[in-house]
Amino acid sequence: MRRTAWIALLAGFLVSIAGCGGGSGANFAGISGGTSGGGSGGTGGNGLNTVPVTVDAGPQAAGGTVNTLYTTVTICAPGSTTECQTIDHVQVDTGSTGLRVLASALGTGIVPAQLPQATAANGFALDECAQFADGYSWGTVRTADLLIGDSTAAAVPIQVIGDAASGSIPASCVSGPLENTASALGANAILGIGNFLTDCGIACETSAVPGVYYGCPVGGSCVPVALPVTEQLQNPVSLFAADNNGVVIQLPSASAPAASVSGTLVFGIGTQADNAFPAAAQIYTVDPNYGTLTTLYGGGTFGASFIDAGSNAYFFTDDTIPTCADQPSFYCPRSTLGLAAVIQGVNGTSASIAFSIDDADANFATGFAALPNLAGPAASVSANAFDWGLPFFYGRSVYVAFESNSAAGVGGPWIGF
Amino acid sequence: MLAVGMALTLGCAPAAFAALGESGASVARDHAAMQGTLSVTPAQSFDVHEIKVAGGQTVREYATRAGTIFAVTWHGTRTPDLELLLGGYFGRYVAAAELHRTGHHLVSIRTPDLVLTVTRFQRAAFGQAYLPALMPSGVTPAVLR
């Protein structure tokens, strides 16, 4: 963080000591009606709990993405079925929580101003910073009804990235390059349906954490604010009236690069015939604070590993595999490598996973979006990562169970396959 | 007392972020005593400066005996200021990040002179960067925590 941000951190800490913030507890899935803010029950169930998903080249402005899973989401002004816009190429991301939509993707069916902007406890307009590994996004927090497939979630706090109504980007938000366009984001929106119910959780309710939520006075500087979990960005699936304890991502196998791959996103685990947890599948619990688990590979233990539809490849440490001369973020082995690693949940459940990787340059040269053998390096320390990105999902049904929910008889958060 | 301690911690932190590849020996050591644990690993030829940031972040800077930072690691729920931490190597991270080819949760570079991974997945933010050429002899990346 910049120097001013450190000062802001201190200020925020002192403000939180003085006792701002607080509020109601988490909006647990399954509680109908809901409280003010935080969304409320919508519709769903009765077999209508799926939506198609596709790996393709992405929105035209993105210039051709790879291994990025997309779906379609309809965003409506709260309580309206006419003030709506359907957004295509919404990235399905199990590595984050909450819906984030580019202001530039709105404007035909509705404009951002038709979605009420949230306010912070200090009375100022609520803006949000989303920090990613490859940059950050900045925008307003607004309330919307969301329709995904046939399921709805009402009055959901969402982020509108690049909203003209947002304040000046505060220094404490800046983290790498700005991602306020479809080109940088690789999508028109991100549908975060990871293990957590809110994007920040109790840490942002109890203190004003820089780099997340901000109160922005008109004509003034945005200041970090504490925000009750019910008012934070919500996992939209957790707010459906039914089939809301997790999701299943089902993709067919891809044995070679392909222009597109189509599958299904199913809402709920063990709630309908189409989302029953198979007897042959196993449950791997993840760290309840971070969402990570463990991978054993090449004699090393990677204790902060994760299974993530929002990563574009397998990323792991192996100094015997050469990186590409023209792109040091990917591996270029001289021939296809057949590898194996063990995924182990916090609960100790484990399985050996066989996977193949090959030359990333050749993969990108196909011009195809689905690259099942794409891989790259990740540096290793004692608690670092083996990232099982989207290639892990080809040919699998991957179950993502939410925190504070029980699915298949086991309390979340967990991943199953 | 706590607030005063916090003020000392935060007041020192910016100056104590010696950047990767640069020498912050005297500055870092002066502030380490105020803000974190300075531990000297016996039988190894490096020092670890640990900075604990409010909110549960931990940043570690690995310095040679001469004071040159050859590695930085971090873990917690937020990414630290990488422009401060990576110094002259920040541009290499930005160049990789701007390609947006790896997704939003991990950016990694492995080159002979710089090995870097930035991870931001759900509620976890962690990573490391090290300079193989500056590692003291006998020291491998396995010592980084």
Image (tube, coloured by chain):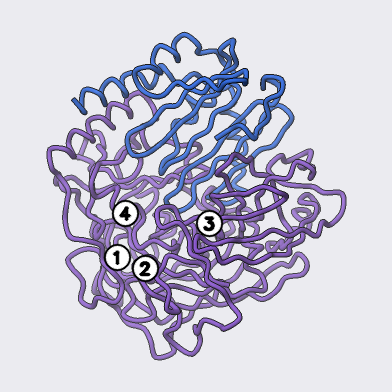
Left or right, B54 with reference to B80: left
Q: Are marks 3 and 2 on the same chain?
A: yes
**Residue at label 4?**
A201
* Sequence-first disc among 4 and 2: 4
User: Whole-Å distance between the Cαs marked 4 and 2?
Assistant: 15 Å
Question: Which residue: 79% across, 47% down?
Answer: A332
Q: Is residue A62 positioned above or below A247 on the image?
A: above
**Who's blue, chain-wise?**
B
Look at discs 1 and 4 and give the one toward the viewer: 4
* Sequence-first disc among 3 and 1: 1
User: Whole-Å distance between the Cαs marked 3 and 4?
Assistant: 19 Å
Question: Which residue: 68% across, 65% down?
Answer: A352
**Residue at label 3?**
A293
* Sequence-first disc among 3 and 4: 4
Residue type, mark 1 in image? Val
Q: Do the numbered discs 1 and 2 sit on residues whose CB atoms are within 8 Å?
A: yes
Chain letter behind tag 1 = A
**Residue at label 2?**
A236
User: Whole-Å distance between the Cαs marked 3 and 2?
Assistant: 24 Å
Residue type, mark 2 in image? Pro
Residue type, mark 4 in image? Gly
